[in-house]
């Protein structure tokens, strides 16, 4: 007696699992490799902002008249460093999204609920998008209703990274 058993479904399932595992490994590897340089960029941007402020302070003491000539340019450099830092932080968050995808697939995803100032987050996102918006002729504005009014705090409990992601996608 000859018995023929169709094992193609189990072979396909095994191949799917292997492919899924391989993609998760690639995802984790790429995310890790991107995160390291982004951490350096963020740290350097923060350091540059501090250096620009120190330069401004030195010039103000040494040559008060010269400060009037370069004050606006140094302020632009400080703002630029802040935007670089914020942009790199957003890129780091996007890399983290790749890792989150793997966690979601393995049912290990967790929200990162913390208390933060929503005004600060909105200001940070607006500073990232301000230049591109102005080049496109768009005026960015934020209106807060119910936050910080009549002694109300603008602190909220939420996943700050997800809020940033949502605002960047608007």
Image: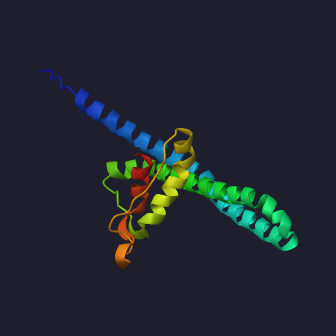
Q: Quadrant of the N terminus?
A: top left
x, y percent for residue 166: 39, 51
Q: Residue at x 81, y 70 (%)?
A: 60
Q: In the orientation shown, which residue stands out farthest toward the bottom?
A: 151
x, y percent for residue 4: 17, 22
Colour option used: rainbow
Q: Name the side, left or right, on which 9 lies relative to 134.
A: left
Q: Residue at x 52, y 40 (%)?
A: 137
- The foreground one among 89 and 105 is 89
Kindly indicate the quadrant of the structure image that contains residue 134.
top right
Total marks shown come to: 0
Kindly indicate the quadrant of the structure image that contains residue 9.
top left
Kindly indicate the quadrant of the structure image that contains residue 163.
bottom left
**Residue 83 vertical position relative to residue 118 in the rendered view, above or below:** above
x, y percent for residue 93: 48, 53
x, y percent for residue 70: 79, 59
Q: In the orientation shown, which residue stands out farthest toward the top?
A: 2
- The foreground one among 155 and 47 is 155
**Residue 31 vertical position relative to residue 153 in the rendered view, above or below:** above
Q: Name the side, left or right, on which 42 lies relative to 101.
A: right
- The foreground one among 30 and 45 is 45
- The foreground one among 6 and 98 is 98
Residue 39 visible in the shown view? no
Q: Residue at x 33, y 35 (%)?
A: 16
Residue 115 visible in the shown view? yes
Q: In the orientation shown, which residue stands out farthest toward the right?
A: 62
**Residue 2 vertical position relative to residue 157 in the rendered view, above or below:** above
């Amino acid at each position: 007696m000859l018995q023929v058993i169709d094992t193609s479904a189990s072979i396909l399932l095994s191949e799917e699992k292997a492919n899924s595992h391989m993609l998760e490994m690639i995802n984790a590897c790429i995310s890790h490799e991107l995160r390291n340089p982004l951490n350096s960029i963020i740290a350097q941007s923060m350091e540059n902002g501090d250096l620009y402020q120190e330069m401004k302070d030195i010039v103000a003491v040494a040559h008060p008249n010269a400060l009037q000539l370069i004050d606006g340019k140094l302020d632009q450099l400080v703002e630029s460093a802040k935007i670089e830092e914020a942009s790199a932080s957003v890129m780091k968050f996007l890399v983290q999204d790749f890792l989150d995808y793997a966690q979601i697939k393995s049912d290990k995803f967790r929200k990162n609920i913390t208390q933060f100032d929503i005004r600060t987050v909105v200001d940070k996102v607006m500073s990232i998008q301000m230049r591109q918006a102005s080049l496109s002729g768009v005026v960015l504005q934020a209106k807060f209703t119910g936050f910080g009014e009549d002694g109300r705090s603008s602190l909220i409990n939420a996943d700050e990274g997800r809020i940033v992601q949502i605002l960047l996608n608007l």
